[in-house]
Image (cartoon, rainbow, N blue to C red):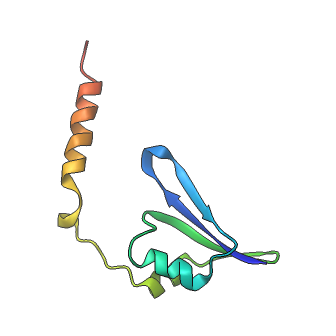
Amino acid sequence: MQYFVVMIDCGRRGLEAVVDPEITRREVISRVSPGEYQNILFIHEVADDCVDDVTEAILAEAALPEIPPEDLDLQASRHDHARDLRKHEKA
């Protein structure tokens, strides 16, 4: 039996492992490419008794574009910062 484990970092919500024995390598790549899977920590291929880290290979095949820092979601960062400030205010 062969399957893939895609570990995704969901931030404050924790980690999410996507494990589906029906999904193929091609399907994993097709989900990584458009960004359906984001914040990938690792991708492991499990086959018989072996576990291989295929993260770099799949990300290279998916050809994810580099996102320049100026395109990051700065509005979300400002909201997080404002919430942190409110949380630490004295009552």
79 or 90, which lies in front? 79
Looking at the image, residue 58 sits to the left or right of residue 68; the answer is right
Above or below for 16 versus 55: above
- The C terminus lies in which quarter of the figure? top left
**Count the marks: how many?**
0
Residue under the point 19% across and 44% down: 78
**Residue at the far front in the pictured view:** 22
Looking at the image, residue 12 sits to the left or right of residue 90; the answer is right
- The N terminus lies in which quarter of the figure? bottom right
Which picture quadrant has residue 7? bottom right
21 or 62, which lies in front? 21
Above or below for 3 versus 60: above
* Residue 46 visible: no
Which picture quadrant has residue 43? bottom right
Residue under the point 38% across and 76% down: 34
Looking at the image, residue 6 sits to the left or right of residue 62; the answer is right
Which picture quadrant has residue 79? top left
Above or below for 40 versus 1: above
Residue under the point 82% across and 75% down: 49
Residue under the point 20% across and 66% down: 71
Residue 60, position in %: x, y?
45, 85
